[in-house]
Image (tube, grey):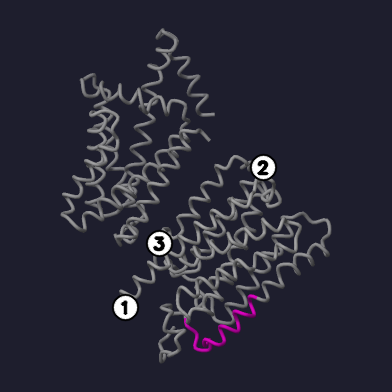
Amino acid sequence: MNRIVLTVFVVEAILGAVGLAGAWWFETPILEDMRVDLRSGAIAIVATIPLLVVSLSGLRSKSGFGAELLEVIRKTLGKLFASCSVIDLLIVSIMAGIGEELFFRGFLQASLGNVIHPWLALVLVSILFGVVHWASWVYALAAGLIGLFLGVVFLVTGNLFVAIAVHALYDFFAMLVIVRMLRPLANAKEDGTISGTISTDQEHNKESIQ
Amino acid sequence: MTDTTPITTPFTETNSLNGTRENMNNKKVMQFGLLVFIGMLIWEPVVSNLIVLLLPDAELLPIYLIHKGLFAVLLLAVVSKVGGLKFFGIERGSSWWFLVPALPILLLTAAVFFAPDAVFGLSTPATVGWIFVALFIGIGEESVFRGVLWRAFEARGILVTAFATSVLFGAMHLIGLLTDIPWQIVTSQAVFAFGAGMMFAAVRLASGSLLAPIMLHAVFDASAIVAAGGLSEMIDDTLTVAHLLIPGAVFAVWGLVCILIVQKRRSRAQS
């Protein structure tokens, strides 16, 4: 297995384990309230669409914010996941969904929400979610906003499965698009030309799918 | 169903399950537990040698399928006749929180796939066969230790039950001393089994059902066998004493902590 995928897998598994154990310790009933059914899946898909549309159109726009964000992603995530196949991206997304949602929404937000006002807990955890994603201030802001959206989804549905599914679906499609957006850029930098991008891009795709 | 008068032995007081049979009092369960444990100790070496005697050319997989499969089926038949499957814990669980006591074995199961010597060199039929063997092992061992023996010790309290069944579970693995596996490996396997027993006890307690430990036991065994490329490949030079003792110690401590937490919560809920 790809070493980056393995690292992500281990980190997310530990994060999920800590979140699960923490929720158990504080007797937060996230598992009792979790419902895995078609309705929750449908809600998750519907909730993912606006998130994807807003964030990807923001990235594609040539405005300062989107361009800066893309540049940060190119430097960090892009390099890491450029060599990943579609299956690798799928594993990473699912693990990120389960691990991060169990920890941030399931454990932190829900447990804190029992002590202070749930909406205050939502804001605090979203800020924390943004801060731990610190690659630059733009990236942290974007992550914080996505965390806020996931927190609202969890708070409104009360079902952690919806949050996990939205997180996994969003991560998967966003990474798929971003990796494809960045590939021509990366190839152009390596070749020094732009003419060869299409063929090398296809080569890349073939390789990574295998 | 306990729709008749409640039985006032300490045994029935501690069990919250509704599968109680009137004809199973504490003494009978103890006797049945002893019988099943001794039966298992005899079954393990005798029947496997008997199969080898009858089928001298058979490979390891069919021998194990017959050996473990027959034990699981016979045990379930006897258990359902004697006290009822539900009485010994084979029923729908009450909670998914057993995932927390199960965390160490879930992480170890994942780690098995990333082990440097994981080769996955089995054909598809062999893989399916070994998965069934793992399932039979899970059903057989869990029904004996977390099912029948669990009920036998239950009157003495949660901690005593967990500790006693785990010690017996570890002791059962000393049967390996009869084979040509190095004694250091066998004794560390027994320690590993003791730790796993403590953790499965916590899982059994948190889930309220025997199905959770059966599932975890089977999934772990299946992953370990399939990743190694067959049971005979599992015990080789790369398996050292530390590979068994360290996880065993982690399992035991984690299991004990989880049992104590569950026990404390139960006593608080009662008062």
Using the rendered image, report if marks 1 and 2 lie on a common chain: yes
Task: Kindly identify which numbered label has been placed on residue B270.
Answer: 1
Q: Is B169 or B25 nearer to us in this picture?
A: B169
Tags 3 and 1 both on a single chain: yes
Horizontal and vertical percent position of residue A47: 27, 42
What type is the residue that disc 2 sits on? Gly
Q: Residue B13's spot in the image, x, y percent?
A: 41, 84
Crowding at label 3, few (<14), some or many (≥20) Cα neighbours within 10 Å?
some
Contact between labelled residues 2 and 3, with CB atoms less than 8 Å apart:
no
> What numbered label is drawn on residue B96?
3
- Point out which mark residue A7 bears: none
Report the span colored magenta: B20-37
Q: Residue at x 49, y 67 (%)?
A: B201
Report the residue at 78% width, 64% height from top.
B51
Q: Where is residue B88? Give x, y as percent.
A: 52, 76
Q: Position of residue B37 (x, y in %)?
A: 63, 75
